[in-house]
Image: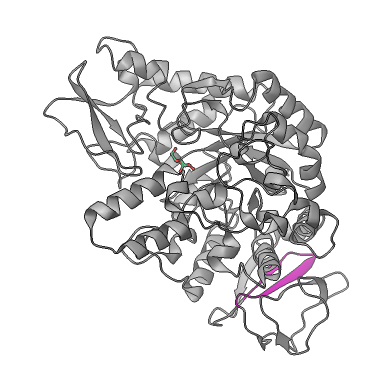
Amino acid sequence: MKETPWWKRAVIYQVYPRSFADSNGDGVGDLPGVIAHLDYLQTLGIDAIWLSPVYCSPQYDNGYDISDYRGIDPLFGTMEDMERLIAEAGMRGIRIVMDLVLNHSSDEHPWFLSAKSDRESPYHDYYIWRDAGQAEDGPDSVGQASWKWVPEIGQVYYYQFSEKQPDLNWANPALRRELYDMIRWWADKGLGGFRLDVVDHLGKDPDLGVKVKGPRLHEFIREMRREAFVRPDLMTVGEAWSATPEEAKRYSDPAGSELSMVFGFEHIKLDQAEGGDKWDLAPLPFLRFKQVMARWQTELREKGWNSLFWENHDLPRIVSRWGDDGARRETCAKMLAVLLLGMEGTPFLYQGQELGMTNIALLEEQYNDVETLNMIRDRRKRGDVDEATILRAAAAKSRDNARTPMQWDAGENAGFTSGTPWLPVNPNYREINAAEQLGRPDSVFSCYRELIRLRHTLPVLSEGAFRLLLPEHEAVFAYERESAEARLLVECNFYGDTIPDPLDGEERGELLLSNLTGALPGTLRPYEARIYLKNRKGEH
Ligand code: GLC
């Protein structure tokens, strides 16, 4: 029998280093800051850290614009710090997963500097060019593909994200070889794996448009798997906004020819208006949400592998987004934890999620995120939505919501920095912080820690087959996980009303975990979440 890979039993924690912990008082988090909090992460019980980019970068897109793939940006520390992080984490049983941004480089990467100054440069073909007249110079707007005019050589180059992030030309085998060498070089430092930024964008053909996948995408991923992800224990997860369950199976097929898994975003895109984008707010359609989660669970069963997530550095905080970040914040954050960590797949937590951190209300001039700033500018120019709607969208969905500094304690700047934080600390840090939650048994942190422990000890949580219960119920998200040994039942009241318990009287097994003390027989209290376990041993 093939051994189960480590990442199928793992819980992975994303560190956005810029906002995690600052060790030198410059207001920006850094690698020594991460090292200083490894004990905290070990207490939480996670198996790996996905580290957002720390490579050399002009930081136009906070590190997702790389100018040297083999160097550490001095903002974050040195290569010695990086190696020390890998070693120190390893001593605590924690692997490091690095972020690979392979769709584009920074326009300050030496490859691009050479490419844009000379058509004969060996690096010219590392990027995608058209002669004057073949493509139009377009306005720079993050997330909208366009072309940028370079007068020195009389050509335009292609970009999908911003003009500071020119697309790499994946059709060029020399470029691909160079990237694979770089990946192997990093893997050799003892990494646990890689997260691949916008993997579904690789190799796009500008003539086919951004909506169409690159015709050779899967060929490239398979090649990269063979040439770069050579160590069999490496975990690879691709960010794939466009993925359907069908495609996710292809990316993550159990034969391992492509990736371990992808981040699928179908659930994340449910709270936006039909035909609009993420800024066109709409309430979460609950029944559809359950259906979507269930479809990914059942379709990928034994044919692929799921990632499980509510948050990352691009998404708002989940308690603010789909829950209650007011009076019932803690109960609600725990319910969302139970709901997610009860499913099949590899859970990814984003820093601060384990504390139930919330969105922040920023003034317009306080936004840092280029995507938000461009949205505000573009919508104003378009003139079809009013000012209040624009600002409401920014407040709800800005990536800055996730990027405010980690709330360590009730001291100055939440213990994040002794200097001036690069982005404001959420003023609620006096109530919501790690120090307050660590030793408190009913904290959000304690709930996550217990759920992680259960995932490590109960095989039914990693192996059991998922079945959605009560698909038509308007408030309860319930499902079971079933294996040969056990049956687990997860029941969550997704909303803030007290309701009759629809599973009351059923054979549920013993109560394993609950986010509220006591019980009101026959009812589910606001955001109440429960896990029941029934062992199969002795049954016929
Ligand atoms: C991904 C990253 C995001 C970045 C973009 C461009 O979506 O998660 O932060 O801006 O790719 O690299």
Residue 492 percent across, percent down from the top left: 66, 74
Residue 457 percent across, percent down from the top left: 82, 55
**Where is 383 relative to 97, above or below?**
below
Residue 400 percent across, percent down from the top left: 51, 49
Tell whether 309 sits left or right of 285.
right
Check the picture and name the quadrant holding the N terminus: top right
> In the current view of this chain or complex, which residue is farthest to the left?
133
Residue 166 is a magenta residue: no
**Where is 9 relative to 325, above or below?**
above
Tell whether 140 sits left or right of 351.
left
Inspect this view and state whether residue 165 appears. Answer: yes
Q: Which residues are magenta?
A: 477-495
The residue lying at 60 percent from left, 40 percent from top is 421
Tell whether 269 sits left or right of 9.
left
Check the picture and name the quadrant holding the C terminus: bottom right
Residue 505 percent across, percent down from the top left: 75, 89
**Of 481 and 377, which appears nearest the observer?**
377
**Of 396 and 50, which appears nearest the observer?**
396
Tell whether 112 sits left or right of 294.
left
Residue 490 is a magenta residue: yes
The residue lying at 50 percent from left, 35 percent from top is 62
Across the whole image, how many numbered discs are drawn on residues?
A: 0
The residue lying at 35 percent from left, 44 percent from top is 143
The residue lying at 67 percent from left, 65 percent from top is 333
Inspect this view and state whether residue 234 appears. Answer: no
Q: How is the image coloured?
A: one colour
Instruction: State whether the magenta stretch is mostly helix, strand or loop.
Output: strand
